[in-house]
Image (cartoon, rainbow, N blue to C red):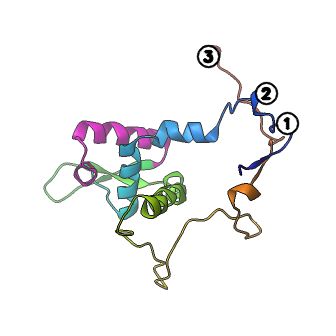
Amino acid sequence: MPAVMEEPLNDLSKWKAEECSVAKAMDIVGTRSAILLLREAYYGTTRFDGFASRVGITEAVAAKQLKRLTEAGLLTKQPYREAGQRTRHEYVLTDMGRDLLPAVLALMQWGDKYLQEAGSPLLLVEDSTGSPVRVEVRSEAGNEVELEQLRVRFNRNWRRPKRRESD
């Protein structure tokens, strides 16, 4: 069963998901290379050549995607300089980039469950306890929420962005 759609959203033929947050997020991270670059940032990669080689993409693709992720605010460039070398930049996660971690881990968890024949190649565990980590959908009350228990309602405090005249 699907989520429960509240009035006026329950008649899907009468509305479109304009200004959809999922669509906006996919505009930024909706490519394989973007997600894998973020994965590498979570693993601790910071240098351009490390991103390109670990993800297995060309330097041109890495440069384009790192620029997009930086312009979008998920990464920031910070200067560094090794002895005898010119100043270069490394890429560091911002709060915005760190906040995307549950979505990336959810993709990993889903892939482990449905796409790996021999189980998970990597295990996610809590540093202090070694306890397995998993992504869940929970309410602020702490309850795990299944799809059928999810209710979608219109946010009456949301305001449609003003369109620029060029739109």
| Quadrant assignment, res 83 | bottom left
Residue 77: image location, x then y, percent: 37, 48
Position of 82 compared to 125: left or right? left
Position of 141 compared to 41: left or right? right
The amino acid pointed to by label 1 is: Pro
Q: Between disc 3 and disc 1, whose residue precedes? A: 1
SS for callout 3: loop
Depicted 158 relative to depicted 54: above or below: above
The amino acid pointed to by label 3 is: Asp
Q: Between disc 2 and disc 3, whose residue precedes? A: 2
* Gap between marks 1 and 2 measured at Cα: 8 Å
The amino acid pointed to by label 2 is: Lys
Residue 98: image location, x then y, percent: 50, 58
* Gap between marks 2 and 3 measured at Cα: 23 Å
Chain part drawn in magenta: 49-74
> Mark 2, residues whose alpha carbon is within 10 Å: few (<14), some, or many (≥20)?
few
Secondary structure, magenta segment, majority class: helix
On whether residue 105 falls in the magenta region, the answer is no
The residue under the point 74% across, 65% down is 140
Give the residue at the far bottom of this rendering: 129
The residue under the point 34% across, 69% down is 118
Give the residue at the far right of this rendering: 7
Kindly identify which residue carries mark 2.
14
Kindly identify which residue carries mark 1.
8
- Circle on res. 142: none
Residue 29: image location, x then y, percent: 46, 43
| Quadrant assignment, res 40 | bottom left
Kindly identify which residue carries mark 3.
167
